[in-house]
Amino acid sequence: MVKESFLTFDGKLVDKNFKCNSFANETLKLMFTRSSVRDFLPKKVPEDILRSIIEAGLHSPSAGNLQPYSIIRVEDEERKRLLAELCLQKFISSAPVLLVFCIDFHRLERWSKLCNTPFTAHKSFRHFWVAFIDVSICAQSICVAAESVGLGSVYIGTIIESADKVKDILALPEKVFPVILLCLGYPRSRPLPQKKLGYNIIVSSEVYHEPSDEELLKAFSEKYDRINVKVTEERLKVAEEVCRNLFGEDEAKSIVEKIRSSGKFNPAQYYFLLHYRADIMCKGNDVFVKMLEKAGLNFLKE
Ligand SMILES: Cc1cc2nc3c(=O)[nH]c(=O)nc-3n(C[C@H](O)[C@H](O)[C@H](O)COP(=O)(O)O)c2cc1C
């Protein structure tokens, strides 16, 4: 028997002549058409709507159902400005609501003490790992719920750069550590959905599949076909410095010459030479470890 309709890879429902009727359902439509929003209307998010999307997020899965996290809701203009400054991105303060997602072992510790129970989760890598996953799942559930009521959002990862100062602004107690900030509000404009690596690259059947070099390059070129970073002397200088720091003078000169003669930076070079500098990103890990320790999360020392 011929099926009347099919679900395509991009969530659309097509009839037997492959005519597209609609997305298979509203949830799939929302997930395929979403994009991060960085341009918000100065319009307040009604309290009942905000409450309902946050509460929806609190229904997310959580390891052992412990929910080792807190969410700090920030709407005060001055506090938003300070957070935007610390996160090094000005637009953040234009979002009507900021949600700061934190790992929180403080609440569980208090509860354990009140119940005459030993507590060591803040000294446990296993607990830290799972708390990080829990808080991320909760944040993403809130994003999906937000989209479903017409709100837009964008995560801000740079909050980690100043986690200790964020603690002061938000009066976070010991053992509470900010993980990610989410800007929320009604979009004034929304970018087109970004291209993603597809199913055949990300998903393997049963065991890990290694694509050929050609397949891999093709997948990334298709994903980043809108990235066009022209060669400038300033960019070449940065690229040379990164390569020199990692590979030495000769290799640096040779890579830079290749970039110069191709006339542009390819997307991998854009990402790891200019945007997330490969020489800088692998340094200073101890600063983050120290911030965690200072916050009372000292699972790296027995
Ligand atoms: C953990 C994390 C950190 C992010 N940090 C930032 C950020 O600091 N600033 C920003 O503008 N976007 C940030 N984003 C948003 C990404 O840039 C965005 O998701 C990516 O470009 C893909 O675009 P899309 O969300 O529209 O699909 C972050 C996203 C994640 C998941």
Image: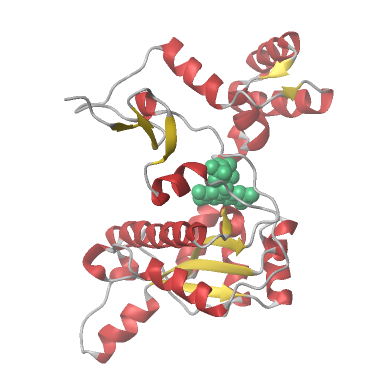
> How many marks overall?
0
User: Is residue 7 left or right of 289 when viewed as pictured?
Assistant: left
| Image quadrant where residue 115 sits | bottom left
Report the front residue among 194 and 265: 194
Q: Is residue 101 above or below residue 170?
A: above
Residue 137 visible within the image = yes
Which quadrant: the N terminus? top left
Q: Residue at x 39, y 65 (%)?
A: 298
Which quadrant: the C terminus? bottom left
Q: Is residue 144 above or below residue 114?
A: above
| Image quadrant where residue 176 sits | bottom left
Q: Position of residue 111 (x, y in %)?
A: 29, 85
Q: Hey, which residue is sitting farthest right in the picture?
A: 233
Q: Residue at x 61, y 72 (%)?
A: 45
Q: Position of residue 41 (x, y in %)?
A: 71, 62
Q: Position of residue 145 (x, y in %)?
A: 45, 61
Q: Position of residue 196 (x, y in %)?
A: 49, 33
Residue 8 visible within the image = no
The colour style of the image is: secondary structure
Q: Is residue 262 above or below residue 21?
A: above
Q: Residue at x 33, y 85 (%)?
A: 110
| Image quadrant where residue 10 sits | top left
